[in-house]
Amino acid sequence: MQPPQVGGLKLAPLRWPSPIGSAQVAANADQVKPVVELRVKVHAPLPRLPHGQVTTLPVTFSGRPFEYAWLWARNLVLLLLTLGLYAPWARVYTQRYFLRRTQLAGECLDYHAKPLALLPRYALTWGLVAGVVGAWTGSRLAGMIALSLALAVLPLLTYVSLTHRVAHISWGGRRLQFDGRCQGVYQAMWAPLTGACVVAWLLLAALAWSHPGGWFAWGVVAALWALAMPTFVWVYFQYRQHHLVLGPVRLLWKGQRVAVAMLFVRALAWLATVSALVVGLGAMVLGGVLAAQAHISPAVLAIGSALLLTLVSAAVLPYVQARLQNLVWSKTGNRYLRFRSRLSVQDYVWLQLRNTVLVVLTAGLYWPWAAVASRRMRTEALVVWARVETDVLKANWAPRKRNRRTKMAG
């Protein structure tokens, strides 16, 4: 079989995973058994395309900056007038706008969440933040206890967010599903959160002890925690991607720990390069100002430092986002569907740098244009390779149930 072509670019042949529930998948599931619990649903095999044919289904985005600008401005005004209480509504309407303008195989995505359903989660999040900040104003010890309790609740918030978000996304009138268990997200996140808690407590002890030995112990633990971060990320995506269900089929993720570790290495190297360039540029500007014997106020120095930090973030964060999207989605699929992401790291970084400069120069008014451009580049970098007709997939995927109000409106 000849490898498929997308936009004139010949892609590498795929090695398709074995069917769900096969011995090979069971073996792979055993490899990640401590962190991933696969509850495989048994479905009748779907008829695939004959002769090993593969169709390419590009993802398109039709959002327009001026169109989104009105929604963004309305959300911003209502957020200010309600002192942030409008946040659930702003979140739902924004997600609905972007998903309804994302199309795959002639069908649009949609978002069906109700803003009132998000209020408990938002209230819990705001309560945790307020509690931690309030405890820190009292004493360091109270602040650390509150922070530890907040970290213990974080996996629960992550689980609720995943299940709620995925369950309210639909494609072609058919809902997606996330069937992971709460204990699974705790298994995936307990190690990094425990490590973060230990690092924070050791830092507090080092500040109170004021001894070189305390700082040495904190440095060792913090370094070990940072070195284990690629494994933490790999474990989390193992949990998340393995529990995404598209009607009759389950997705699998074939990402390797080595690939995640190499992503961190490349990101650190890029961070060092960008930081050196930005610090050098800042030193040149500062040297020129001092040579001219001009007075620099602390406020101007603080603003300049903030701009340099923003520039570094605008170059490093998109680099990580682009590589992470390519790694996660290019390794996601099953025997019927396979996702591929070809997001250009260089183009995405330059786009975000330009967006950052224009947002700063326009005092934030350029944000809708930046958001639409970023969403379009990330979305249209995705392609779905299918070994099954979309009509067959939809025929084996029950449509979402509509309530009485929706039926009456239809």
Image (cartoon, rainbow, N blue to C red):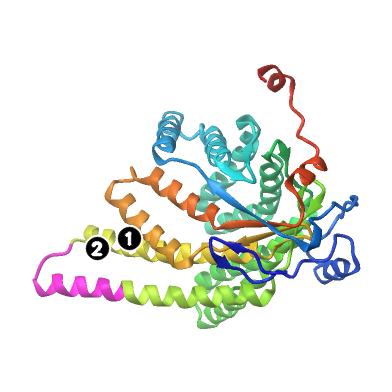
Q: Considering only vertical position in the picture, is 250 above or below 87? A: below
Quarter of the N terminus within the rendering: bottom right
Identify the image quadrant of residue 169: top right
Q: Which residue is located at x 45 percent, y 74 percent?
A: 270
Identify the image quadrant of residue 100: top right
Residue 59 is left or right of residue 255, and the answer is left
Give the residues in magenta: 279-296
Instruction: Report which residue position mark 2 lands on.
Output: 301
Q: Nearer the viewer, residue 406 or 94?
A: 406
Q: Which residue is located at x 54 percent, y 32 percent?
A: 89
Single out the mark in the foreground, 2 or 1.
Answer: 1
Q: Residue 365, percent across and down? A: 33, 42
Q: Considering only vertical position in the picture, is 206 above or below 407? A: below
Instruction: Report which residue position mark 1 lands on.
Output: 306
Q: Nearer the viewer, residue 45 or 402?
A: 45
Mark 2 Cα shell of 10 Å, populated few (<14), some (14-19), many (≥20): few
Q: Residue 256, percent across and down? A: 69, 73
Residue 320 is left or right of residue 49, and the answer is left
Q: Please state which amino acid type lies under the numbered disc 1.
A: Ala
Which comes sooner in the sequence, label 2 or label 1?
Answer: 2
